[in-house]
Amino acid sequence: MLTAFLACVMLSFGLGATSAWAEGEALQGTLTNNGAPVAGVKIKAFTQDGAPAGEDTSDEQGKWSIPVTGPGTYRVDLDLTSLPSGVGLTNNRPSLTPTVADGQARNVLFPLGPAGTSIGGGNQPGTKDSGPSTFDRFADLLYSGLHFSLIIALAALGISLIFGTTGLTNFAHGEMVTLGGLVTFLFNVTIGMPLVLSGIISVVIGAALGYFQDRAFWGWLRKRRTNLVTMMIISIGLSLLVRYVFLYFFGGESRNFADYNAQAGVQYGPFLIAPKNLIADAVALVVLAAVSFALVGTRLGKATRAVADNPALAAASGINVDRIIRLVWTIGGGLAALSGVILGAFQGVGFQMGFQILLLIFAAVTLGGFGTAWGALLGSLVIGLFIQISTLWIPTELKSVGALAVLIVILLFRPQGILGRRARIG
């Protein structure tokens, strides 16, 4: 209830109620040459099996948009012969393979510049494009998998710490991820603050909300000796409530942050990476490393591990168990909010962005071993990479199913997870 109330207050500040249903998936972009819009350029989209998905021509502002039939991976081709005289594609990659999420309008960027300034090989105007090579697709998917793994890992680490210290499987954790993206959108787009500052504010609010929801809600339930199954069911109801509060105030469509939205990729060997994604990766790695080090090398970290191992013995040793649990909820809320900020910059902001990856977060935690921080990180890496790279062989719509199938197979041979410990039951 506390989460829902605070979400209402924050989202109602500058965000009126909007349509409650998604506007649909689309591919879109803006073509510019040194800041000047480029009109009259033809763009075509194809499904994974090569069927035409739509086409458009850039308008006077250089904008183009192609509605698609649903989420998935598409091939987007820029017709080099339609480029104006003296304008060329600077990275010689006229075909890209973006993945569109549910309800997302995915931005696709083709960097243009003076003709003859292209880097590396590639198709030239007047030649037929056969699409990206398998190696190019593999390189793109490999990096996307690593990037997505870090996003999952931030949320998975928080949920693993909460489970380890309280035993609670918190289904409302996905809404904390969503909250991070929506609060950042509120400050960045509605109020007009820089994205970096908006993201920092979002993480602080997420951490504060993690603290106060345990102090006012989950801690109260623990004092009443509410059993864990009942608390898990309460978390499911809380998740549904907050999600539809988000839907009411934010609407069902996917939106983008105001800053770094149309950022061209930079070629690093076989990888084409937008600088914003590299910065986000660096931030995620630093945060994950800092939290992991704190768990191993600080007194609070040792106290946290003691509470996770045996709360009664930790309390008898003089450790304030409630204080440690509250600290864990604070860290978990901040990590989830940061995950939402990076996810929003990666694929746009929507009211169910956290719910859409919640199952993958649980899969990562379960695969690595419930309650183990290192297991959550390792499980996230396996899940993120498999989901993206598997689309080379299976339809995009089935990529999550494939990841869960791998999870089942591994757990058949190691039920406690990769880094989990065997436990005697009964």
Image (cartoon, rainbow, N blue to C red):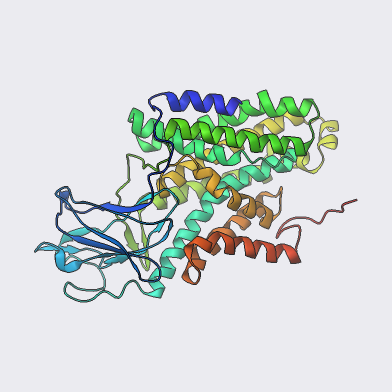
Question: Residue 106: image x %, image y %?
Answer: 36, 52
Q: In the rendered view, does 396 fall on the left or right side of 156?
A: left
Residue 301 figure quarter: top right
Residue extending farthest right? 426
Does residue 237 sit above or below 424 in this rendering?
above
Q: Residue at 64% across / 50% down in the picture? A: 362
Residue 99 figure quarter: bottom left
Residue extending farthest left? 85
Q: Residue at 65% across / 32% down in the picture? A: 327
Residue 233 figure quarter: top right
Question: Residue 90: image x %, image y %?
Answer: 22, 63
Question: In front: 86, or 42?
Answer: 42
Q: Residue at 60% across / 40% down in the picture? A: 173
Query: Where's the N terminus, which quadrant?
Result: top right
Q: In the rendered view, does 285 fall on the left or right side of 15?
A: right
Q: Residue at 56% across / 46% down in the picture? A: 154
Question: Residue 393: image x %, image y %?
Answer: 49, 72
